[in-house]
Image: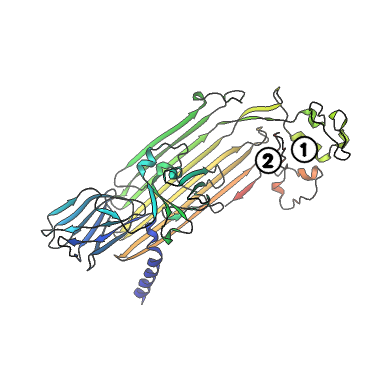
Amino acid sequence: MGSKLLTLLAALLTSALVSAQIGTQGSFFGTVTDESGGVVGNAEVTATNLATGFTRTVQTAPDGNFEILALPIGPYTVSVTARGFKKWELSRTELNVGDRDRISPVLQVGEVTQSIAVQGAADVLQTEKADVESVIQMQEIRELPLATRNPLALVSMVPGMRYESTQNGGERATYVQGQGLRDNKTAFQLNGLNSNAPMDEGGTAIPNVDAVAEFNVQTLDFSAESGRDPMQVLVVTKAGTNEFHGALWEFLQNDALNARNTFAVSKNRVRYNQFGASLGGPVVHNKTFFYANFQGTVIHNQTVYNSLAVTPAMKSGDFSAFSKIIKDPVTGSPFPGNRIPASRINSASSYFLPLILEPNSPDGRFKTNATAPNNTWEGTLRIDHELTNAQHLSGNWVTVRQPQTVLGYNPSPSITGYSNVVQNNIALNYTWTISPRTLLMASGGTMRTNQTYGNPHLGKQNDDQLAGIQGFPSAGRESWIGPPDIFFGSGYTGVIQVRISKGT
């Protein structure tokens, strides 16, 4: 009874998930025939990953058909053996993200000790999918220049697609757009699990370019298992192999290499350093592998302030330096000498006027250069383990921490805010090939983003009440109280405070 229940459960899961494995893994299938065109049943078909030694063997059905499902991407050799025939071997073929590659082995009569070697990939065809897709492979990811080192920027290589933007802070989401659709109509997967930001549907927790093996962009006619969105971006991280491989890198920008900004009082400081390392290899030869990647981004650049400011005379109501006539809103008559009497200035305005910046240059503008540190620390870890020849277990963890200084209308230490984003994406995948036609897959994961930001003024005093402004209840919101945001419609610098918040 128990075995029957297990078989039923496996069949149900297979019907729901067998197609989904095509998203980030690959498959070989085909028909084995002899030279006369007759099918060859009970032949053994073996696919071997050249990088990890991973091997999966299936037998052809009586009609000569075979399928090898849920294979990790990478270079493979495929061989076919049958009694009374020479061994047939495809010496090397590359299995990419989502491939369903048809192989058509033709066996020749002879001893198994003899072999026929097929060179190149001409014998491999993609015939089972009608979707329009483009695979961005490791060589392109590694060698094409990227200003952001965000691999998703390479979607611009796909016809009809474009990279739009990546958030600095928040959910750190990346937005792509194409096919006439909005930028929130793309589904992102990382190693087979959803990686969409829950709020705005951008791609989030995607590792840097050195951690990505390849990704697949599907824009038309893909299968239903791909998800709810009309476009798909399927990302696969690198995995360890039987050989140790590592890398070190650093990229920098520095003001010593730059010219002065036309509107800056001096050459603004630029300190941009991006560095990292990666290492992958075997834990147990042919069985357990790891890949680890770290990247740090340290940005201590300066922001140029060059904006109109409110003069002390204007704060007292004296607009005599302006040619435009200031009129009394009650009587409609001009104020004498373009001066507003102190008695007519609202008490709430008088309370907030000291917060408004004043000019620090002869031309009536506020000018300065201010440093805004913005650092990002990223880590990626992937473990692959072959439980048996039919069972594969893999897990990955992507973590990001991004602390940064947030400059408001005034870059002084008493006003400057802060922000910190902590992001974790954890996934686990289990694959069991029960039989050549039955596959069980189980996947689970969690993705969490937590952002905290604020400034020194928040939670100190209720400025709305002190200014005499009514109608803004603050009970239960004591940690949020502080100056309101004040904007001017003529380009003058107002008051913009950073609010404190936490998001998941």
Q: Is residue 454 left or right of residue 439?
A: right
26 above or below 268? below
Q: Is residue 112 left or right of residue 359?
A: left
Label drawn at residue 425 = none
Sequence order check: which comes first, mark 2 or mark 1?
Answer: 1
Residue 106 lies in what quarter of the image?
A: bottom left
**Front residue of 416 and 234:** 234
- Asked which secondary structure carries label 1, the reply is helix
What is the spatial separation of the Cα atoms under label 2 and label 1, in whole angstroms? 13 Å
The amino acid type found where label 1 is placed reads: Phe
Q: Residues within 10 Å of mark 2 (few under 14, many from 20)?
A: many
Reading the image, the residue beneath label 2 is 497
Identify which residue is drawn at 55% across, 31% down.
301
Judge whether residue 236 can be spotted in this image.
no
The amino acid type found where label 2 is placed reads: Gln
473 above or below 40? above
Residue 379 lies in what quarter of the image?
A: top left
Q: Residue 204, how many percent across, how many down?
A: 50, 49
Label drawn at residue 352 = 1
Q: Residue furthest bottom?
A: 1
